[in-house]
Image (tube, rainbow, N blue to C red):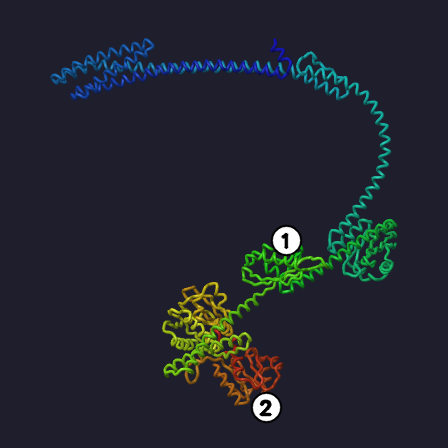
Amino acid sequence: MKLKRYSNKSLSRQVVSLMTACIILFIVGTGILFYVLQTVNAEYIQKRNGIVEKELLLDEIYEQYNNVFLDARGYIAFGNETYKDKVWSREDKIRHDISTFKDLSSSKADEKVHTDLVNFTDYYFNAIKPVFSNMEMDGSRDKGKQIENEITAQVADFRDSVRSYSSALSEKLDENVNALAKEQSILQGTFIGFVLVFLLVFQKVVRSIIRNIGKPLADFSFAANEIAAGRDAIISVDEGRGDELGVLAIAFRKMIASIQDKEQELMAHNEELLAQQDELQAQQNELQETLGLITKNEKQLTRRNELINGISTSLDKNDVLKSIVCNMSSLIGADRGMITLINEDAYSSFGISEYGVQQYRKNINTGLNERLIEGKKPFTVKREQHVSEKGYHENTNYSYDLFLPVLSALQEVDAIMVFSRYGSAYIEEEMSECETLAKQISTSLDKIKLYEQTEDNRRLNQDILSTIQEGIQLIDQDRKIVQVNQQFCDLFKPGSKPVHVIGSPWERWSSEMDSRIAQEDFLDTLEKALKRADEEADSEERTFTFHKKENNQVLKVYFEIIKYGEEAYGTILVFRDITKEYEVDQMKSEFVSTVSHELRTPLASVLGFTELMLNKPLKPERQTKYLQTIYNEAKRLTALINDFLDVQRMESGKQTYEKKYVEILPLLQKVIENLEISTSLHDIRLLAETDDLVIIGDRAKIEQAIMNLLSNAIKYSPDGGKVLIRVYSKKETLSIDIVDEGLGIPQESLKHLFQKFYRVDNSDRRRIGGTGLGLSIVEEIVKSHGGHISVKSEYGRGSTFTLSFPKITLKEERTPNDGHSKKLSYDIMVIEDDFNLAELLRYELVDSGFQVSYFKSGKKALQKLKQSPPDAIVLDILLEEGEMDGWSIMKELKGRPELKDIPIFVSTALDEKEKGFSLGAKEYLVKPYKPSQLSKVIMHTLLSNGKKGQIMVPRPSWEAERSL
């Protein structure tokens, strides 16, 4: 009873109790069925194990007897003692297994089989013992075979009996399996019946729960709907229930009573609220009118804010003007309008065609605009609408134009605004508001004007800074970059623009600058210099010098304080590239050192040996030796001075070259012969790998260049060795390699090798001596001949200097005297009426390697020209009287396509160069002039322009290849 009362006090307890009872019932029934099933299975397994064990033991006995039968026959047949021993040993095993079978016997059939086994065993072994004994005594096998035949029938009966019993055991196993299956089927049916019974019980439990809980809840739901609909509700749930539903029923009844009480109060309040609603409706109408006015003002303010934002958020004049005209049109409800600046070509329009805009701007200073500019006050004009404005309207309509001036700070009209509105006039309040907005627009335009002036000044300052070759950097008091020029960016931040650098703080730009400077204490030096410049305004120590890492560029920094009045604004730093000055200073120092060393050494020898010869009596051979030494040192001084003079002439552009055809091979042989006399340690070899051994140049200068290089190869191979001179052709060049096995050149010195006065900083080379001018002279000579010099070297292994000159390809030209001779010549035609001068010119040209034909008559020369054009013509203007003059010949030649490209060199006493050049003269020489000048000009022109005639003469190889 206590448990029932405890359950009835809670719905959850009731449900839990019923569900628990169902679960316990299901668990108990299932447990009983499971126990029965386990018992049946255990009994079956026990019976099966007993039968299987008997079968196995009987099979073992049967197998042992088979082996005994075989062994006994073997002994009787062969008399082998081993078979007999096996028979007696298996007897014990058989009797032991028969005894075990007896223990397993559980039925009369089992006992009968046991008895048969014992009897057969006794019979068999008692029967064969006499046989085995007789065979041992007399060895007679016939008796054994007779006994064996007698027991064969008993053995067969034994075997049949065993097999019959084994079959009975198998049938018994099958019976046990069938019995087990039958019992399991009964148990499964019982379990299914139990489940069905359990489900029926569970259904009744659920129905009980629904009846006790669901129905009262449905009643509560119906009652709640009735109350919500305003009708009376009846609660059928007993309040005496002790569970939650009973408590809920009491609460529902109290709620119904409370709702009925409140309903009366709400009715009274409702009447009062209806009266207040009428009063609020009147107030709402009043507020609606106020809201409309506020909304209108809000829209007006919004448009005004848009106007102010449009003119204040941009500094682009066109954008600001566009924003003004659009926002003003929206603000005052204008249908079209425009704004235009008076003194600038800037305007913007809204709803106006480009033609109308240009028409208005063309008459900006006339009509109503003149009235506006003079009066400086806004006004309106009423006018009849133009046909283009009326659209589809047929009656007379009017448009109202508002003219607004925009005054500058000096109260001058800067801009004019005109707005047109159809159908409604502008009131005084709108005009006053527009005048106020015009003042704000004026402020914005003044701000833009100041910005443009500032930008123009900034661009002007930047352009001025960019034209300065030095790097300029302006920093403020916080050392932040205010302004730089492009040269500064190129020095310390290549690829960037000033706009990328301006605004960088001290930490950034100083670290970037420090990363490109070679000196480790650069930042400390810069810091001290800036600090000194700030603290000591009159200090003169405002500079220092430093080197850049990547190109060893030398820069000098100048500091200057920038002040506004008495207050310091910042510091300007000027970075000047003094690399060339620095190198010149170093070169001067090197030059002085070199000259002092190179001049003093030979002078000391000259003075010393001269003093000896003057002050001491010497033997003739001694005097000769001393004089030879003085002569050699004097030659050394002369060569040194000649080098200095050559450098000076080359730098001033006064070096002249007598260029002619030069065969390289004889020149090289001559240089080698001259140098072999002065050395016995070096093996100088010449290797020619081409037949194209002719170039155009000054023989003496080319010989000087090769002499310098070969002398260096010998001089910088102090231990001797092989010196190879290799001549070969490569495409359009003739190259000469001078290879030595000497000291070699460090890689870092190769790029400075051809600088004047530069010498490799090495004690071995300092001991060798030299001015450092030889290679710079060689480079200048080679470049003047259109060539190139290069060097490859492996330090300690030797060097290779390569000279490359433009190659000249020779073509064979036959002559009447020698059909196989070769001439290095172009075909030149000389047209000159003065025989002596013609002979002089012919000798000069032939000596320079040209083939020359001479004509005194202009007509004959022209006939020859048409038959066989030469490569160049030397033409006199004043020929014999009655002959064609030079002008006529030039006109005739330039008028023929096949002859117009032949270069003409005028040689005359007339100083009419302009006319000569206008008619196509290549050069105009006024008599008298040096004949060598003529040959140089012709040679230079032909080598530069190529051969234009048809005669087989020398020409550059590249042109020959191109003509193919």
In the rendered view, would you say 747 is above or below 191? Answer: below
Quadrant in which the N terminus is drawn:
top right
Label 1, label 2: how far apart the Cα atoms are: 88 Å
Look at label 1 and name its amino acid.
Answer: Pro
Look at label 2 and name its amino acid.
Answer: Gly
Which residue is the site of mark 2? Answer: 882
Quarter of the view holding residue 578: bottom right
In the rendered view, would you say 798 is above or below 228? Answer: below
Residue lying at the far front of the rendered structure: 615
Q: Give coordinates of residue 131: x percent, y percent.
A: 16, 15
Q: Nearer the viewer, residue 175 or 745?
A: 745
Q: Give coordinates of residue 527: x percent, y percent.
A: 61, 56
In what element is the residue under mark 2?
Answer: loop
Name which of mark 1 and mark 2 comes first in the sequence.
1
Say which residue appears at 19% left-offset and 20% top-offset.
83
Q: Give coordinates of residue 604: x percent, y percent.
A: 45, 76
